[in-house]
Each structure stands twice: as structure tokens, then as C-alpha cells.
Amino acid sequence: MSESATSVAKKRPEFRNINAFTDLPTYRLPAAGIVSILHRVSGAIMFLLMPFIIWMFDTSVSSEISFAKFTSAFNVGMLALPGFFWKLVALALIWAYLHHFIAGLRHLWMDTHHDAVSKEFGKTSAVVTLTASVGLTLVLGAKLFGLY
């Protein structure tokens, strides 16, 4: 036998499964991971609220009467829910669209520029994506709630 076969093998690193109760509360997800998860969440929100989106579009462009019905849903409310609730739903849709769009542009850029992508670029582009989507949502939310 050769000497390498009989010598003591190096201790290999031990990889464990993540325990949801002990490891996840202390796990710190990087910004790129947060953007990736929120990209999926925003896509799911837009998909699940597609009937509401279609209703909003249909009632806003059908006629003047249906547009008045549309605006009263945000001012007075409908289906026993106040108008504030429907504005929050619309704000969630605004955020979902903006985040999904900006994160999609980020992913397209990374897919087409493989040589320019680095760990630092991933971090900074993730922070820019989060900042831009939240900032634009705040601006459009202020308009939705009548602050300007």
C-alpha cells in the first residue's frame, strides 16, 4: 500500500441541514438574496391579484359612469371594505409592479453582461433595486393617498 492511503485522511468539513428554529432567526440573507425572494413574491402578488387588476382597468376605461364607480371604490369603499383598504391593495400592486420591473431589469443586465458581473456589483445593484422600488412606491403612494 502506498503511504498516502495509510496516512490519516484530512477531516472534511461537516455540512448540516439548516434547522428552521435555531439557524433561521440568526441567518443574515444578503441584499441580492432579498431582492431575489422579493422578485418572486412580487410576481406572485401580481398573479394572484390579476382579477383585481382586470376589474380596475375595465371599470376605469368603460365609461364615465364606470369611472365614477371606480373612483368611489377608493374614496368610499366597496364590498363592505373601506376605501383605505382598496388603496392599500393598489399600493401593494404598485410596489409589486415596480419591484418586479426593476429587479427584472437587473436580472436582464446580469444575464447579458456576464463579464461585468461581480459580487460587489450584485450587492450594489440589489441595494439600488430595493431603494428605487421603495422610493418610487412612496412617491406614487403619496399621490394615491392624496398628499400632493
Image (tube, rainbow, N blue to C red):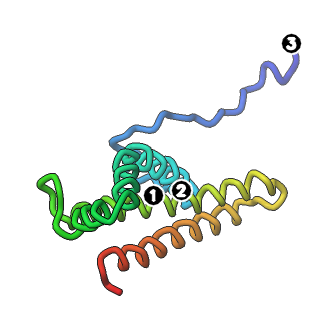
Q: Which mark is residue 100?
A: 2
Q: Residue at x 59, y 62 (%)?
A: 102
Identified by mark 1, the residue type is Ala
Q: What residue is pinned by disc 1?
A: 96
Of badges 1 and 3, the one in the foreground is: 1
- Left or right: residue 9 compared with residue 19: right
- Left or right: residue 110 compared with residue 20: right
Local packing at callout 3 (Cα closer than 10 Å; few below 14, some 14-19, many 20+) is few
Which quadrant holds the N terminus? top right
**108 or 93: nearer the viewer:** 93
**x, y percentage for residue 41?**
45, 49
Q: Disc 3 on helix, strand or loop?
A: loop
The Cα–Cα distance between marks 3 and 2, rounded to whole angstroms, is 60 Å
Q: Does label 3 or label 2 sit earlier along the sequence?
A: 3
Q: Are marks 2 and 1 in contact (CB under 8 Å)?
A: yes
Residue placed furthest toward the top: 1
Instruction: Tell me which corner region of the image, top left, top right, bottom left or bottom right, holds residue 103.
Output: bottom right
